[in-house]
């Protein structure tokens, strides 16, 4: 939905931000749970697409918000830990999973953040490499729209405040957070949306419409990858959404 100055943007397609830092590469998303330090299942719409379901089945460290536990068990998948205030759990499930249930009653954070903080606190960090842990979020959209918007915006919070590389996967695509100039894997025709957070400067290469420092969330939606990769040249933080290939 990039409709601002499209004709001018054609001329600017290769006018990149001067003096940008070295290009980062956003880690490829292969849909395999073993690629993530933790997988967190929220209590939104339960995944039905092949990729998020495969992530659930292959996750080595699956943290489940308590409201999603019953749906998970219908797929005969066992969690590593269950986190939440307990309001959504039956007494039977509380007893059955007492050994991995971690009640957190405070109300400052939602269950997604409680699960994230729990998973983050139990990671063994490699301080020598300064590598950000990769967390995958499933079931974080759908049902109430305010929860969906809040959960998507939390990806930026986790990236900035918790030093996590979050990936939110839905039945239709996936969100990642990026900062500065970054190269992204893609496929020709892949639908791409860009949500600017703090960028004062932004341009792109490899997209149908050139990016610019969007002021509104809708301005960077409904773009399209032209080849197997694209690059965003930027001086701040932003969210990238890409659709699944299948």
Image (cartoon, grey):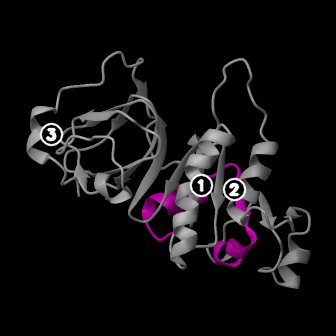
> Is 28 on the left-hand or right-hand side of 192?
right
Q: Which mark is residue 176?
A: none
Q: Position of residue 86 (x, y in %)?
A: 83, 75
> Is 155 on the left-hand or right-hand side of 116?
left
**Looking at the image, is mark 1 or mark 2 nearer the viewer?**
1
| Residue labelled with disc 3 | 9
Q: Earlier in the sequence, mark 3 or mark 1?
A: 3
Structural distance between the alpha carbons of marks 3 and 1: 31 Å
- Vertical placement of residue 78 versus 177, above or below: below
Q: Which residues are magenta?
A: 47-72
- Vertical placement of residue 28 versus 142, above or below: above
| Residue labelled with disc 1 | 154
**Looking at the image, is mark 3 or mark 2 nearer the viewer?**
3
Q: Position of residue 124 (x, y in %)?
A: 79, 34
| Residue labelled with disc 2 | 62
Q: Is residue 219 magenta?
A: no
- Quadrant location of the N terminus in the rendered image: bottom left
> Is 68 on the left-hand or right-hand side of 151?
right
Q: Is residue 49 magenta?
A: yes
Structural distance between the alpha carbons of marks 1 and 2: 19 Å
> Is 192 on the left-hand or right-hand side of 123?
left
- Vertical placement of residue 201 versus 186, above or below: above
Within 10 angstroms of label 1, few (less than 14), some, or many (20 or more) residues? some
């Amino acid at each position: 939905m990039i409709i601002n100055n499209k004709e001018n943007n054609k001329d600017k397609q290769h006018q990149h931000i001067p003096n940008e830092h070295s290009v980062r590469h956003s880690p490829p998303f292969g849909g395999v749970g073993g690629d993530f330090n933790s997988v967190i299942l929220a209590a939104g719409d339960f995944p039905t697409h092949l990729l998020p379901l495969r992530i659930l089945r292959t996750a080595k460290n699956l943290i489940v918000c308590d409201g999603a536990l019953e749906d998970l068990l219908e797929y005969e998948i066992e969690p590593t830990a269950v986190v939440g205030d307990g309001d959504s759990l039956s007494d039977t499930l509380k007893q059955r999973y007492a050994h991995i249930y971690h009640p957190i009653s405070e109300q400052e954070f939602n269950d997604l953040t409680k699960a994230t903080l729990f998973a983050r606190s139990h990671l063994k960090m490699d301080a020598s490499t300064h590598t950000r842990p990769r967390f995958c979020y499933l079931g974080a959209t759908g049902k109430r729209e305010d929860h969906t918007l809040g959960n998507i915006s939390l990806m930026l919070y986790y990236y900035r405040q918790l030093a996590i590389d979050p990936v939110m996967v839905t039945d239709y695509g996936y969100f990642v957070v990026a900062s500065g100039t970054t190269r992204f894997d893609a496929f020709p025709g892949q639908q791409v949306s860009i949500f600017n957070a703090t960028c004062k400067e932004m341009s792109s290469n490899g997209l149908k419409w050139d990016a610019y420092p969007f002021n509104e969330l809708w301005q960077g939606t409904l773009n399209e990858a032209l080849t197997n990769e694209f690059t965003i040249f930027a001086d701040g933080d932003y969210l990238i959404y890409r659709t699944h290939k299948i």
